[in-house]
Amino acid sequence: MIAYEQVEEYMKEVGLKYIKTPNDFIAGLAYRTDKQYAQDMAYELNSRGEGAPVDNAHFYELKNRSLDGSIYVSAAFDGGVFRHIGNLIIDNGELLGDNVLDLCCDCGIVTCFMAKQYPEKSFVGIDINESAINNAKALAEKLGVTNAEFICSDVFELDLGKKFDCVTSFRCLLDACELKTQGLNFVGSREEREATYQEAFSDYAKIVAKHLDDNGTLISVERYTAEYGWLGWMQALEENGLLMCADKCSQMQAQDISNTKEYSVTFASRNYESKPIEAFEAALSRNFKSGTGYDGGMAEFALYYDSEGEIEFTDVIKGTRIIHQYAFATAKNGKRMYFDAANNNRKIKYYNEKKEGKMRADFEAKIKLYDDESFKINTYKK
């Protein structure tokens, strides 16, 4: 990606360099901190990679054991998205107003960037982790930032007694709402699934609305994407009186040490007019082409956005969870559509009518893999 000069200069000043490989990461981390810190972080990351239960509170406590360590870990896993966020801030600087509340700011990298970029404005960064807040204060002092204040607080108990012109939430909704989203379905009816995410995000959205001035703007960049959760996040904001700017809401891709990750970009305000589904469809339709097979969130979007008439769903249920979903539909251009989703893997195929038999046979063969004793098959149309 191309980052603005101001963004690149700041990243160099802070020390957010691109890190190419895991070996480079561990070696660099040990050099900047100590061998024990690097070993502890490597163990934590390897455990996550092997499917161990995620404990974000423990991870961020470890990450913020030192300022240099915290910044270096951020460089490896969030350097790309931070550069995108820096560009986003510069492009929308007028929406920050005079005072900004940055929720779940971690060690203050983005908060301090905003404060340096706009010295005439005031900023408040909030995080539940005391070590992160101490690191944010140290980073501000190191950079000569005097217009940013950092407060240690649980975001769900936050009550600053004042309103802000802008509230920002950058790459933190997943961590803040971790306990509330555990166990939620990845697949199933989009309306039902996103309603569960709406409920999970409701308390966080209330904090945003509580601290946002009547004319203020929320800017968020989150790891909840079109695959699950983003629509629910926008619905939670709407529930608390905030609507979307369809022209500004968008998808974002950013590179980290291991792969390219997707993010959702949301602009919300009491003065905007777009309903969640309108903003969601506007954002995804910019890169959508009918008749093309898709994987991921765009596959499910194609099913709902491009189908004409009823969609024929088949859900595979184990206990109370939908573990697999299939769907057949007819696209607006007359082609047929075959949707296959399991966990967070989704794909859709477009095909001509003469291939209907082949697609149905594939579907029937897959359904037969689920025995009647362990699984329930539910077929319906919507």
Image (cartoon, rainbow, N blue to C red):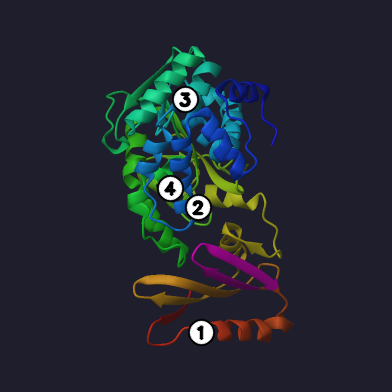
Query: Label 4 to label 3, Cα distance in Å?
Result: 22 Å
Queried whether the magenta region covers residue 343, the answer comes back as yes
Residue 92: x %, y % from top left: 57, 27
Q: Secondary structure at mark 4?
A: helix
Counting residues from the start of the chain, the first of labels 4 and 3 encountered is 3
**Any mark on residue 233, and which?**
4
Front-most of 58 and 33? 33
**Any mark on residue 369, and which?**
1
Q: Secondary structure at mark 3?
A: helix
Counting residues from the start of the chain, the first of labels 2 and 1 encountered is 2
Q: Say which residue label 3 marks.
A: 111
Counting residues from the start of the chain, the first of labels 2 and 3 encountered is 3
Q: Is residue 255 visible?
A: no
Query: Label 2 to label 3, Cα distance in Å?
Result: 30 Å
The kind of residue on which mark 2 rests is Ile
Residue at image coords 43%, 36%: 63
Residue 218: x %, y % from top left: 45, 34
Give the answer, above or below, for where 123 lies relative to 262.
above
Q: Secondary structure at mark 1?
A: loop
Q: Give the magenta range.
A: 337-350
